[in-house]
Amino acid sequence: MIHEEADSAIVKVSGLSYSVPGRKILNNVELAVRKGESVAVTGPSGSGKSTLLTCLLGLLTPDSGSIFIEGCDLARMPARKRAALRRRKLGMIFQFGELLPELSPVENVALAGLLAGMSKGRSYGRAKTLLERLGVPATETPTGQLSGGERQRTAVARALIAGPGVLLADEPTGALDAGTRDDVADLLFALPRQRDCALIVVTHDPAVARRADRQLLLQPSGLTEVLSGAH
Amino acid sequence: MPTDHGRGRRLWIQLLRVGLAAGRGSRGGRLRFVALVLASMALVTTAHAAVVAASAYAGRDHRDQARGPILAKSNGKNAAFRWAESTDAVGGKQHWVIYLEPMSASAEPPPGLPRWPAPGEAFLSPGLLKAGNGAHIRQRYGRVVGEIAKDGLASPGERLVYTRPLTAPEGKNAKALWYTGSGFGHPWGIGEATDPSPLPQVILAIAALVGMPALALLVVAARCGSAARDRRNQLLMALGAGWPHRALVTTGESAAASALGTVLGTVAVLPMLATDVPLPITGYVLSAADLREKSALLAVSALLSFAVAVFLVVALNRAGSVAQSTSPRRFRERVPRLRLVLFGVAVATVVVSQYFGGRTGLFLFVAGTLGVWATLPSVGARASQWLGAKMAGLGNRRGNPGLLVGGRWTGAHPGVIVRVATAMIISLGLIGQLQVWNSRLGEPARDARATQARIGDQVLIVESRDITPGRWRDFTSALPPQANAITLNMSGGDKRSVTLISPCATFQRFQTPCPSKALPVPSSSKNPQIRELLSWYGGENMSVQDGNHPAGKRSGPETIAIITGDHVDALYRTGVERAAYTTLNTPSISRLGDDWALGAEDRASLGHWLLLFGIAGMTLLILAAIVSAAAEFLRFGPALAPLTALTDNPGIYGRIAFWHLTVPMAMSTVIAAVITVWHSLFFISVIQEGEVSWNAMGGSVVGGILFALATGVLGGWAARRTSREWRPTAD
């Protein structure tokens, strides 16, 4: 199934392996994700879910295999080109948001736009629009004083500002209560269709994973499809 | 089975071990360890400095008493020796010359002398022999037959002379000039023992100039990496640990570093127990024997200092400092209004101090200054919040990420800027005060130095008593060939008019009409040496009298000017001094204006002590600033690292560091310099002396700005380095 979809995939991973001294974390991982599609990667603790995401983000260089993002092989690129590709084509949402707590939500989101080379007017304009659509008060309140859900929605807005083709989310609801988790998950899984991008979510939470178009289980043998029949 | 008592003891040890492990494993643990070692070293060094001062004073007082003459009974029955005093100077520093004349064969010489000097012999202290080497000191007082031993000196470096005139004291002034002693062992006040600074004042200066900065360094070191410690304390609290348990963990974390610092600080003092050590800047030589007497006190001060260091670290990480919220810690939005009001009151006190003058003015100035320094951090925090908001606003308007993040950080975390800026302001303040203190000369001292710079030893003043025709003849024939002796006769002793007495040939040599009636001083002579002499002794009128020195009719000292028109060197002065010491009765030789110049030099030597303590204190404050800045890098790097997912431009870290660290610190330096200059000018107006050194201030500002730049560059580099290693983690 993965091979059938591979040709039209915006993200295409094949034969990906990564190890640290004394331990193999990723072993021959294969993955393909199309535009408009959401994929949830689950697996037990220590199975390498976050490592896979970090490889997709270009922050770790795999031992072997390839990672194609919109046709560019991330694994073969020098660090500077990887960073440029990350800035243009990838958006990342972390478990704890990783926002700068001293900045207001608008500033946090606009900062990503400014750093991606967008004009000042466009960065602040898009930041305000995104936050408004995601239901975050665009006030001068420092982000550190927002609720967990508001912070995570701000992180989503930040990931979206540069219009990335691929959204990566690492346990995006891991630090939220059940109600807020559902709100954020609804928002997140609606994005691929709304914005014609691919979404890869790493999660422990089966309730969150079930919302994805496809669920994959990361095991020592590699990534395998979970046929839950949800979709 | 272990008893409850046994378990309690194990818990005690266990908690200390937990602390030790936490210190090793925590982020920034190494920095905190080094900072605590340095702070404990500084604290123990301060405590040891107080012990060293106490030992030096005790030894000096003891030896001063041992060498002071006990006056003989008025009937002279128990008289053993005669004793007279005068002063001399080498290199602008005054020393005492003691004249001795034994009256009994069995009389004991003063401590430090193996025997009484024979007529024309002298014993000199090693300190004077060393200092006067270039000034041919060995030829000044007669034949040098030995050195004064340490038990006869206030300190090993004291400058002192014991000499015996060639001829026994005689003349009608002899009785007034010479004391008769029966032995030694009475507090008298000789040489260094006349030092006007009492011990409590010295200890207060050490405490204020070195102790306070040492405490500041300890506070910074104790709170270094406090976020992790506060979190750990919170966890311990949640697990049911009381404050003694948390105190034990904190003790375990800090005790090793504090102990190491205390040991290193103590080890640094140990050589002073073995050998006499000269202190930098002041040149004062500390006696090892005196310190050995107080070695037990050194051990006590080390233990106390260690205890204080550990206690303060525990107190500074007490329960109240534990964050009660899971939200990120933020500086309190509002600085208490009272602190700002107090700052205003302190500034106003400094301003009004100039209208009081004297002790009241000085008291108000010092109180206002301490108030300004104490409330400065609060004002700095408010200013930092304001500056941060302005910078962030500008960053938003311009779409400048570095300015935006740097501004928001400066507003939200003013602590680092306040700590560094306060250290800079106090350092600059100290530099300013010490520089102004050292520059306060006063008009007469400035004139004296100008005179001495113009004519050097070309005019020397010799004062003596009972100058008989024979002594005069011996003296003038012993003078160097180019020297001319002129007697000064001040009418009424008020120096308002003076008569110069010498053969007319001498005056003609110095372009001065002879003989003459009284003339106004400004038009009396064209000769520069005579004009300088008259500017100090002439008053309004002078006259010139042809003839020799009038034979010893005066009671009290007589004044002779030794003049030469030639360029002279140190050997010339030694020649004049030797002639005086070998022929005249207890002479005193000085340059024109020495009363003022040497007084200023004495004051400068007090300034040297302040400079020594001040430099030590400033070094500690700067260390505190560096530790504080380094701790900031620990926060700065990880906080910015996630930006790595947003940008491919590593320069952003440097730009944020520039706006967050360099710009506020550089602004603090400039503001600190303005405050210091303003403050120094008020100080000058209160004491009516001194001047601001723009070179010193400029150098300090350049140094401060370079420090700010270095801090920014290092901060940017640390963040960039951390960002390269950063990986997203999910708990």
Image: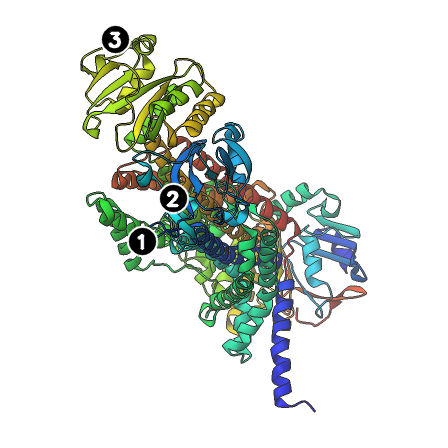
Q: Distance between the residues labelled 1 and 2?
A: 13 Å
Amino acid at circle 2: Gly
Q: Earlier in the sequence, mark 1 or mark 3?
A: 1
Residue at the spot 61% in from the left edge and 73% down from the top edge: B16
Q: In which quarter of the image is the N terminus of chain B?
A: bottom right
- Residue A101 seen in this snapshot: no
Amino acid at circle 3: Pro
Q: Which of marks 1 and 2 is nearer the N terminus?
A: 1
Q: How far apart are marks 1 and 3 (CA)?
A: 63 Å
Is residue A26 toward the left or the right of residue B384 in the image?
A: right
Labels 1 and 2 within one chain: yes
Residue bearing mark 2: B429
Count the labels in the image: 3
Mark in the foreground, 1 or 3: 3
Q: Which of marks 2 and 3 is nearer the N terminus?
A: 2
Residue bearing mark 1: B371
Q: Residues within 10 Å of mark 1 (few under 14, many from 20)?
A: some
Mark 3 chain = B
Q: How far apart are marks 2 and 3 (CA)?
A: 55 Å
Look at the numbered disc 3 and give the secondary structure of its residue: loop
